Amino acid sequence: MQLDEFLDFLTSNDIPFKTTHGSIVLNNCPHCNSSKEKVWLYKDRRNESGPFFGSCMKCSEKVNSRSYLIGLGYPKSMVDALHGPAADNWQLSVAAIDILGDQTVSKVLVEDKEVVEPDISMFLPLDAVKSSDAAKYAIKRGWTENQAESVLIDYYGNAVVFIVRHEGQVVGYQRRFVTPFNPKMKVMSSQDFQKRRFVLEFPNDGDICVTEGPFTALSAWHFGYHAICTFGSNVGEKQIDRMAQLAETHNKKVAVGFDLDSAGKKGYSRIRAAMNFRKIESYRVRPEYGNDLNDSWIAGRGIIVLTPKDEDNTMPMLDLPFEAFI
């Protein structure tokens, strides 16, 4: 059963619904009888002819499109006809969701190069699952409604998901697990996500602030910066081009909030050399408290702008031409 077929059935039978992020939201849960919009259904991308599946966000019971319609009182024969002849053979459960698997559905051209376009339809808006651990964690780390399109929730994977777009096109995402499946695997990116090519942005009026991680970028946004996350300190040329483009277009300086370790200093050196090459002013910032800007923001503290004299002399900044880093 395709999406249009299911939506046409709901519409023609006056069953209220709404769609968001590739999901269908319904009320009247067949298990708890909730009259609010609590039933979320999704399509298993590996079985396009199959049903929609999901659960009730109030009672947590599993629901699929077939059981939902039968629960509303529609005859089994009518529901089976809508879903197709294989309806009785479906094995439906939330376990069928391949949380860690390949969700790629297509490829797109970005600047004449092929880029994997990941499927993000399995992720939910934070407002829809505010009681979940992942949503509470995101809010604690700084999420606001301003980031509703860029920060989603992997409800079943218990993860905060940062969506990366380039000119409106989704080009990748990164999950941050609240309770990792593997203690060593706190982060997982979408397949073939080109992390050194694209950036996650949280627009704001202040200077540009470049950070290694998305939550640190979120804190930089709270401090008034136009925040850019490069997913690590090993910045790529395309990421540097984006920083420079923003700085030149909006007449802004570039602040760097990388970690104060050797890798962070090397990344800052690369950015500073690139900005010097383009005649763009850059500087470094560090947290007033804790290890990064997010620690400082959560503690209600601020940031410190470093001058060249403040820099740690144990690893001198490299005043080399930008070409030396290419």
Image: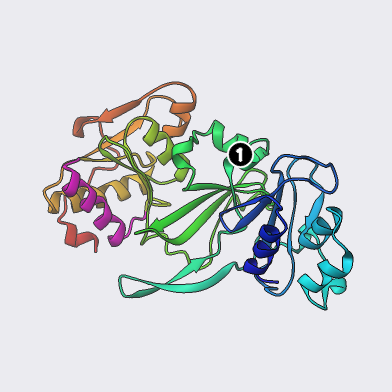
**Residue name at image x 18 percent, y 48 percent:** 249
Look at the magenta stretch and give its main secondary structure: helix
Picture coordinates of residue 175, whole percent (x, y): 56, 52
* Left or right, residue 162 beside residue 250: right
**Residue name at image x 47 percent, y 47 percent:** 149
> What amino acid type is highlighted by mark number 1?
Ala
Tell me how the rendering is colored. Answer: rainbow
Q: Does residue 181 belong to the magenta stretch?
A: no
**Residue name at image x 23 percent, y 44 percent:** 317
Q: Is residue 326 visible?
A: yes
Give the number of marks: 1
Q: Which sits in the foreground, 195 or 81?
A: 81
Quarter of the image where the N terminus is located: bottom right
Quarter of the image where the C terminus is located: bottom left
Report which quarter residue 89 is drawn in. bottom right
Residue 316, relative to residue 278: is it above or below? above
Picture coordinates of residue 237, whole percent (x, y): 28, 61
Q: Does residue 238 belong to the magenta stretch?
A: yes
Report crowding for label 1: few under 14, some 14 to 19, many 20 or more residues within 10 A (C-alpha): many
Q: Hey, which residue is sitting farthest bottom in the picture?
A: 85
Q: Is residue 90 visible?
A: no
Q: Which residue is mark 1?
A: 135
Q: Secondary structure at mark 1?
A: helix
Q: Which residues are magenta?
A: 234-252
* Left or right, residue 94 beside residue 159: right
Q: Which sits in the foreground, 237 or 165?
A: 165
Picture coordinates of residue 67, whole percent (x, y): 83, 59
Report which quarter residue 12 is drawn in. bottom right
**Residue name at image x 34 percent, y 59 percent:** 167
Q: Which sits in the foreground, 75 or 30?
A: 75
